[in-house]
Image (cartoon, rainbow, N blue to C red):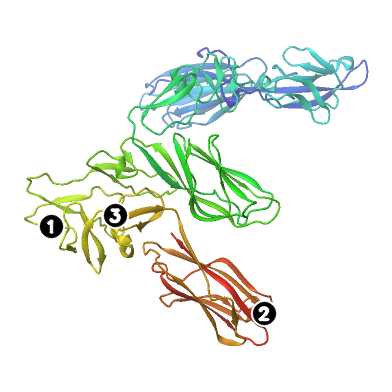
Amino acid sequence: MMKTTRTILSFGATAALLFTMAACTSQDPSSGAAIRTQVYEQHLTQQVFIETDHPYANNQTKEWEIAAPHGTTHLTLRFARFETEEGYDFVTFLDRDGAVLSRLSGAHTGETFDVDGDYVKIHFASDYSVTEWGLSIDSYSYVVQNDHPTDHRPYCGAIGSRSEGWYWGDTGELIKYASCADAGTPECRGITSRSEGWYVDGTGLIVWDNCHHTVRIAIAGEHCGPSIGYSCFDNLYCQGVPTNRIGGTGTCLATGACKEDADCTADGNVWNHVDCTGRASCNHEKCVWECTNPGPWSWTSVLLQGVESEHPYANSFEHTWTITRTGATKIKVDFSRIDLEPGYDWIAVAANGQAPQYIEGSHRNFTSQTFDGDTLNITLHSDYSVNDWGFKAIAVTYYEQLPEDSCNTTADCPTNQSCIPHYCINAFAPCYGHCARDTRCDDGSQLACRRAIPMCPEGTILAYQEACYVCVDPNTCQPPVAGAEGDPCDDAHQCQDGLMCKNVVDGHGTCHDTYWCEQATVGGDCGLLDHIMTVGRWTCNDHHCAWQTGVFHSEISSQDTPLTIPDNDANGVDSHVSVTALADSCTWNVAVDLNITHTYRGDLVVSLTDPSGHTAVLQNRHGGFADDLVFEHEAVTGLAQDDVNGTWTLNVSDHAAIDQGNLQSWTLHLDCQ
């Protein structure tokens, strides 16, 4: 026997009543006019509880019945789970006369079974051996056909020619007289707008009405829940009624709003909160997150994607990019490049109602001021004429509470612990380290403490550094030779605790404190130190290691141009630029700006030679009879990427007679990765 349940609309997207209309005509004997009638299909869902034991027993039988409301033309059963012994334990479906419609066994979880009509009997039988999980049916859908809709929506009635018109489906009340012969399907447009109402294409407005009531959607402050078949509009949830419970009535509230603590963890109430271990509570009808095991507050930096203008940007243009980090209390942004028309085009950086920072002109590696809050808006505005390259934001830095036991730098860790960086693939998301104790040996132990150099076998990577030190037995390993400040050091001669072997050249260096450096060896002097975990490089400032964030750019323009290009001379003309004091801790990308005026650029060969003597050809007699040769930030490959200091030479040669020209200018761009 079927377990009785109350007929309700399912809660959620399927709670809406969906209708299709099939038009036909009939002859009214009194008038001879063709009268249009309509058939409305009503699609509904009902929850049921049809289950075997889990697992079911041997030699067991059970039966259930489903009798849908009068007028049902079609049933669809959904198997929430279906697992029986294949070929031995069966679920049989029968019609009202006892005729078998189908027999199923085996695995059919998630599948559906269709029945014509308004009735089906479900019979389960197991044999004497082997059992499985069983059967669960949690809902069925059905289709009812009516001559008019049964909910609150207009339909065009055809009850004789004199009374043709629009009527409400639920009450039968006349809305207005109209001919139904050409009546289309009415559509309710707009939710919570002043022009809500029912329209028909080609006819226009039928009647003013609240659409969300018709499609059984509640807005903020209105009742909701499966017992009345109303779900909530976008970005709302049904407060007071869990979506997994049959029955009950709640109130639609905005996500993040609440009446009691339990609302903040209710199904559908999806709201953002600080990323730390804790609990949610309701405070003045707003959900708040309380960190029960809070981590340290720290500056976190991540790279950005897609926060940049077109290059060049358009005239008469304005657009805003938004950067948000939920839970942050301060935020700022790093730009790798800004080039705007001075005095006319500008960038405004603003946050949370604070006075914006306006930026004009050209800047490299520019950092905005620090704003309070967790959201930053970058607006680019251009006037009607003259544009430039635009801007690119490379990273965002925000002050936030880290997850428990996480860190960005050693300063985030308790005393006697260090921040151990993690190996991360995604540079566009936070990558915290973890705090760990230096594994030094206790005084008086039989072990000596020696610095561990992180090494990985071939084909592996260093996921994270477990400890800064390891302890070894001095009887089996060579005891460390403790060098003092200024003493020489190498692989066999270590430095005292608190000192490191710095300024190492050809394996030999000098003992100095942890953050001491020389610019020439800054990569080795500073490379193993903790730093804020974002893209950047080590620099040496007055013999002190400093982490500089961002993507670094150096551009050097020629000072010996313009130069005349000799006609029909393979030797051509040379122009030089000199690069000095760029760090060897970068991998440098090379690009060139070039401006040559010439009456036949197909005569020209252009090459660039780096300080180590490698040459790349930029132009080899391409372009035919076209005039001039202009590059802007043209990438060059095959040249030095590590040590770029020294003289770079651009050679331009003309390989045919008559046409002539000049090397007007060129610029070398070096971008540190």
Residue at which label 3 appears: 528
Q: Position of residue 95 (x, y in %)?
A: 58, 20
The residue nearer to you, when weighing 624 against 553, is 553
Q: In the image, 164: left or right of 196?
A: right
> Can residue 141 be seen from the camera position used here?
yes
Residue at which label 2 appears: 600
- Crowding near pointer 3: few (<14 within 10 Å), some, many (20+)? few
- Crowding near pointer 2: few (<14 within 10 Å), some, many (20+)? many
Of the 4 image quadrants, the one containing the C terminus is bottom left
Mark nearer the N terminus (2 vs 3): 3
The three-letter amino acid code for the residue at tag 1 is Pro
The image quarter containing residue 665 is bottom right
Q: Position of residue 107 (x, y in %)?
A: 45, 32
The image quarter containing residue 294 is top left
Q: Say above or below: 104 vs 381.
A: above
Residue at which label 1 appears: 480
User: For the point 50% across and 27% down, which residue is it?
Assistant: 79
Q: Say above or below: 574 vs 368.
A: below
Q: CA distance from mark 2 to mark 3?
A: 54 Å
The three-letter amino acid code for the residue at tag 2 is Tyr
Q: CA distance from mark 3 to mark 1?
A: 20 Å
Q: CA distance from mark 2 to mark 1?
A: 70 Å
Mark nearer the N terminus (3 vs 1): 1
Q: In the image, 33: left or right of 359?
A: right
Q: Position of residue 329 (x, y in %)?
A: 44, 35
The residue nearer to you, when weighing 17 against 79, is 17
Element type at marker 2?
Answer: loop
The residue nearer to you, when weighing 443 against 339, is 339
Circles 2 and 1 in contact, beta carbons < 8 Å: no
Element type at marker 3?
Answer: loop
